[in-house]
Image: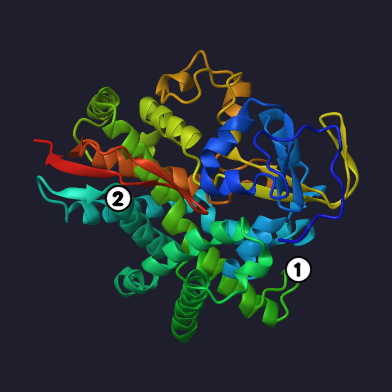
Amino acid sequence: MTSNTASPAGTIPNAPGALPFIGHSAALARHPLRFLSSMANAGDLLQVRLGPFRTIAVCNPDIARQVFRNDRVFDKGGPMFDLIKEVTGHRAMVVMEHAEHRPRRRMVQPAFHHARFPAYAEVILDQVDAVMGSWREGESIDLYEQSKLITSRVGLLTMFSYMQPDWLLKRALRDSITIMEGVFRRIITPSALNRIPTLGNLRYNRANARLRAVVDEIIDEYRRHDVDRGDMLSVLLKAESEQQAGVQGRTAVSNTDVHDEVTVFFLAAMDTTAASLAWTLTEMMRRPEVYQRLRSELAAELGGERVSLADLPRLKYMAQVAAESLRLHPPVWLLTRNVTADTELAGHTVKAGSAILLSPYVLHQREDMFPDAGRFDPDRWAEPGMTSRIRDALMPFGSGPRKCIGEVFGMTELLLALARIVPTWELGSRGSEPRSSVSFVLSPRNSRATLRRIA
């Protein structure tokens, strides 16, 4: 990590638990969620030190929205995004700075147009049914692994629909896990140590190279067949060909741009929604009354028929369960921003060059917003007691102009998967307590369930 030469406002208090020389590095590395929880109610802004590097942690949802919305001053950047570029490359939308981001987002947006969602929904439902079709009565399954099978297939068949997933899953699933775990380790490790050829660094670099090779194969297949499937990769390749042909008004798109965007969507489709689905099933498995209440809602609203996209707005309790799961377990739990100009934040002067840390996990633990914040309570999202301020404090997908472009897609996939699994299977806990696995994505570890088919 590079030391920040700009000095954050000296009046901002330190986060709890700093040690001499290393600051909060040990706390973040050993018990990251415990450390973040300690910040949630300790102040609105806190200084966090990772060795010589200083960052300002935003712990208040109202201030966080201010940072998210002003993406010109609080631009993408900081140590997290520098390391993410090792995976995504430098030309993916997720790591682009303000000036380039908006044209790229407009270019990619057609792949997420609402008109495409009926077709996407059918793919989602078919793939959920395909994975459930391999489950057997009395079998023990790992909920996160099974969720990744679902989301990987869905991602490939909606974002890159020309390719079939079987060969790709075998080659890429393990590498994606290695990469996601390695990114977080490298964020909290001094940059010099990341260059040492340790076993972990070698494994990470090899997985990264293999995944990029797989993405190249996908792109080459599309180019060879010259098929416009109306999916995300087709949108990118069309933009690339129009730019090369000199179509006026088109943003320049290179082969590197296409490669980097495909890599990002491949990883995002595989891991973030899988973590959300697995956590939601885990929380319900631990609370049979929640599982039964959701099953009753599905029976009343669907009458035994397979759920459709049009049914989702009526399934109010399912939406509450999903929201509460995302509050407690936001899959992307740590973000950074780079301050591009001297500014003021919550009454403090913040210098250009300062780093801002934003953690949805911290924001969702605020007791003034979410009383008894550590408790899983879907009813906290029920109308009419819900206020807009509390609703806006839920930020698992970020906020503002750089809010995750795949938010609606991810939520649709999560809800449709729940609506198929819950009426079909009872999930019995194996007795062991699931734990959070903290890598780039916050996922459940040791979350096993015993299957019992619903008659």
Taking the image as shown, residue 196 lies to the left or right of residue 234, namely right
Task: Give the image quarter of residue 221.
Answer: bottom left
Does the rendering let one see residue 275? yes
Disc 1 residue type (three-letter) = Gly
Q: Helix, strand or loop at disc 2?
A: helix
Dot 1: few (<14), some (14–19), or many (≥20) neighbours within 10 Å?
Answer: few
Q: Quadrant of the N terminus?
A: bottom right
* Res. 363 in view: no
Question: For this view, does 101 lie left or right of residue 416?
Answer: right
- Estimate the x, y position of residue 383 in percent, counting from the top left: 48, 17
Residue 16 rendering spot, x and y as whole percentages: 66, 33
Q: Which residue is mark 1?
A: 249
Identify which residue is drawn at 61% across, 55% down: 188
- Measure how far apart labels 2 and 1 are at the Cα level: 38 Å
Q: Compared to 15, does 258 lie above or below?
A: below
Single out the residue that lies furthest toward the top: 385
- Disc 2 target residue: 125
The numbered dot on residue 66 is none
Please state which amino acid type lies under the numbered disc 2. Answer: Leu
- Percent coordinates x, y for residue 240 in the rendering: 63, 76
